[in-house]
Structures are given as structure tokens and as C-alpha cells.
């Protein structure tokens, strides 16, 4: 529930109201904002009867938040959240679509430095790269671990880029936190509730990917875990879901982008690399994602995709990526 306050509500009136709500057995959150000031009540088991709350003259209106996710909803927070990275990337609101690009896996020093140099020339501000890889087969390349994190950081610092990398195992929480500017939660960890709670306690941006079999509601409830812990710097990522279709690796659900923008204030970006699993489809689906209103893209990039240690079949080479970059923001809605 949201109790919206009048513009001229006085501090003693607000204090009295907060106290009345506490006495009624609820814990109120004071929510100052540019557009409106409100008091939020969440965690209630059912409908709250307003007459129990001791409302006073400070109250303009009472809104019942209908969605199971509260903090993430637009009802709770009507204006767009913008998530900024230290090196200048901005996701959300009216900012132009932001790009994150880089290899699926960190492979070696030369690869990471060449990628970083290339991205900085194109004015891309954030580099991705997996140091810990969630692979379907235990025999596939699993990533270079902490050494990979260090390489990413070194190359990113040289070219003033942000590092976006996945936290796969909680035991590496501190190392990933130290080396990353944005911590990626992969599709397979979207409902790792312990991980989400830990990320709620930090003040660093999180890139939350949608689970491959997660509904949009489950996706937003996963984000709610992070916000409920106190960290509101969350960027959502639609990366395709499992359907009956097998021609493409996943089915990129662009409905989710448009829908999430209606119901949530959080930025949402698209991963057309995992969403399609095919190099040839990355550019068309990137354009579609931007046209539907995505706040950015995360793209897998490799100098020689045929030699990549993971996901080469969906990587763009440098020339393909440069072509994509050149045109893509033209498709953004005005
Ligand atoms: C990745 O980004 O390399 C990755 C493993 O993505 P996802 O978690 O979406 O499968
Ligand atoms: Mn990948």
C-alpha cells in the first residue's frame, strides 16, 4: 500500500502518521520523491483496511499496490530508475540505448586487451566477459576464474571501461565485487535467493538476467529481492526463454521488454546473443529490441568467433559489431 502525502504535509503530521501505522502493526517506509512523497507499507499478508491506520490530514490519497512485487513496480515508484556505471554508461530513462560488449569467456590477455581497445575506439563504455562460466557440460571450458577477473580489470582500467561479469558461485562474491563494476546474475542463478539477498546488501549495480524458464512475474520478484535488501541499482536483462522452438537457441521474448517497461521503473536491456544463439540473427534482433524500447544491449563479441572457447556460434566479429553499433540507436523510439 502507498499513502501519498499532500505537498504541504508538515513534519509533525508525518511523524504522527508513521507512529500510527507502527501502532497498527505495520512497518512504514518513508519515500520522499521529486514527484510525490509517500509512505509505503509492504510485507502485509492481505488487504489493509485504511480505517486501522490512523490516517490524518497529511494524506492526499491511498493506493493499493496490486502487484506481488512492490518496490520494483511503477505503482510504488512512478519515475524511471537510471542506473549509472562509474565509467559513464547510463541505463534507463531517456538515455540513449547503452551497449555492453565483449567475449562470452575471458580467454587470454591478448584477447581481452584487443577487445577493450576496440570497444574504446567505438566509444562503447562497458565490457563484458565471463571469468566463471556456467556450462551445460562439465567437459566444456569453465573459465579462468579469479585470473580472468584480474585480466578484465586490467584491460578495462587501461581503456577506461566498466567491467560487467558474472557472479556464478557465492564463494567468489568478494573477488567479483572487487573487480566488477556491474555484477551479472546469470539465467541459471536468477532464483538463487541467497545470492539475490547478498546483492541487496551492496551498493553496486547488478545485471539480473531472466531465467530461461522464468515468468516475467518471477523475474520481477527476483529483482524485488535485491531492492528489498536496499540496493535499487538493478538492470534487468531479457536473454530468451525456453520454448518448444528448436531452430534458435532460445526464444527472445520482446513482449517482456515492452511489458516490463509498463509495470516497472527498472531499466531493461536485451541479450540477442543468447536470445537467438546465431550470429546472423544478432543484428536484426538488436534492432528489434531497441525499437521495442530496450534501454540497451549486451552482445557477445570475438575477434575470431570460430576459435572461441565458448559460444562462438553466436558471437559477432569486430566488423559485424562495428556495423551494428553504427546503426542501432536510430531504431530507438522517440
Ligand atoms: C553469459 O552471459 O555468458 C551467459 C552465460 O548468459 P545466460 O546466463 O543468460 O545464459
Ligand atoms: Mn555466452
Image: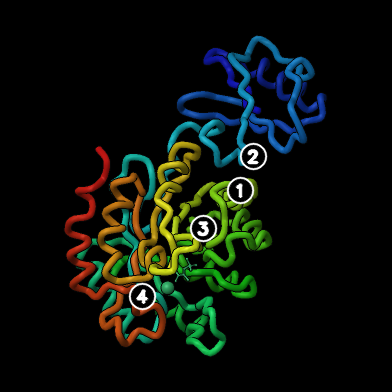
Whether residues under marks 1 and 2 lie with C-beta atoms below 8 angstroms apart, the answer is yes
Helix or strand or loop: what does disc 3 sit on? loop
Answer whether residue 231 is visible to the viewer in this image.
no
Front label number (4 vs 2)? 2
Report the side of 40 relative to 16 (left or right).
left
Give the x, y percent position of residue 48: 74, 25
Q: Earlier in the sequence, mark 2 or mark 3?
A: 2
Report the side of 181 relative to 294 (left or right).
right
In this figure, which residue is indicated by the disc labeled 1? 221
What residue lies at 71% left-to-right and 24% top-to-bottom?
18
Q: Earlier in the sequence, mark 1 or mark 3?
A: 3
In this figure, which residue is indicated by the disc labeled 4? 103
Mark 3, residues whose alpha carbon is within 10 Å: few (<14), some, or many (≥20)? many
Between the C-alphas of marks 2 and 3, the distance is 17 Å
In this figure, which residue is indicated by the disc labeled 3? 210
Mark 1, residues whose alpha carbon is within 10 Å: few (<14), some, or many (≥20)? many
Location of the C terminus by quadrant is: top left
* Label 3 beta carbon within 8 A of ligand 1: yes
* Label 4 beta carbon within 8 A of ligand 2: no
Q: Earlier in the sequence, mark 1 or mark 4?
A: 4
Whether residues under marks 1 and 3 lie with C-beta atoms below 8 angstroms apart, the answer is no
In this figure, which residue is indicated by the disc labeled 2? 68
Front label number (1 vs 4)? 1
Please tell me which residue lies in front, 274 or 21.
274
Amino acid at each position: 500500500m502507498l499513502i501519498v502525502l499532500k505537498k504541504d504535509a508538515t513534519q509533525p503530521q508525518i511523524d504522527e502518521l508513521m507512529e500510527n501505522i507502527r501502532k497498527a502493526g505495520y512497518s512504514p517506509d518513508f519515500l520522499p520523491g521529486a514527484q510525490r512523497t509517500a509512505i509505503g507499507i509492504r510485507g502485509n499478508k492481505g488487504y489493509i483496511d485504511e480505517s486501522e491506520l490512523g490516517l490524518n490530514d497529511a494524506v492526499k490519497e491511498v493506493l493499493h499496490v496490486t502487484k506481488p512485487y512492490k518496490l520494483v513496480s511503477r505503482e510504488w515508484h512512478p519515475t524511471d530508475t537510471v542506473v549509472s556505471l562509474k565509467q559513464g554508461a547510463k541505463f534507463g530513462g531517456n538515455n540513449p540505448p547503452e551497449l555492453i560488449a565483449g567475449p562470452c569467456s575471458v580467454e587470454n590477455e591478448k584477447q581481452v586487451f584487443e577487445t577493450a581497445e576496440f570497444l574504446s575506439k567505438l566509444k562503447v563504455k562497458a565490457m563484458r566477459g565471463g571469468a566463471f562460466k556456467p556450462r551445460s557440460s562439465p567437459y566444456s571450458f569453465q573459465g579462468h576464474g579469479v585470473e580472468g577477473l584480474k585480466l578484465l580489470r586490467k584491460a578495462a582500467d587501461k581503456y577506461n571501461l566498466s567491467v560487467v561479469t558474472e557472479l556464478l558461485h557465492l564463494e567468489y562474491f568478494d573477488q567479483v565485487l572487487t573487480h566488477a563494476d556491474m555484477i551479472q546474475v546469470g539465467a541459471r542463478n536468477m532464483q538463487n535467493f541467497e545470492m539475490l539477498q547478498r546483492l541487496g546488501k551492496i551498493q553496486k549495480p547488478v545485471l539480473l538476467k531472466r531465467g530461461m524458464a522464468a515468468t516475467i512475474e518471477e523475474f520481477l520478484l527476483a529483482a524485488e529481492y535485491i531492492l528489498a535488501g536496499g540496493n535499487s541499482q538493478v538492470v534487468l536483462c531479457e536473454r530468451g526463454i525456453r520454448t518448444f522452438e528448436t531452430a534458435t537457441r532460445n526464444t527472445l521474448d520482446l513482449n517482456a521488454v515492452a511489458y516490463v517497461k509498463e509495470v516497472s521503473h527498472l531499466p531493461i536491456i536485451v541479450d540477442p546473443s543468447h536470445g537467438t544463439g546465431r550470429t546472423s540473427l544478432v543484428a536484426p534482433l538488436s534492432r528489434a529490441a531497441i525499437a521495442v524500447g530496450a534501454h540497451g544491449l549486451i552482445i557477445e563479441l570475438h575477434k575470431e568467433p570460430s576459435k572461441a572457447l565458448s559460444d562462438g556460434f553466436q558471437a559477432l566479429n569486430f566488423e559485424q559489431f562495428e556495423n551494428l553499433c553504427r546503426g542501432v540507436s536510430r531504431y530507438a523510439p522517440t
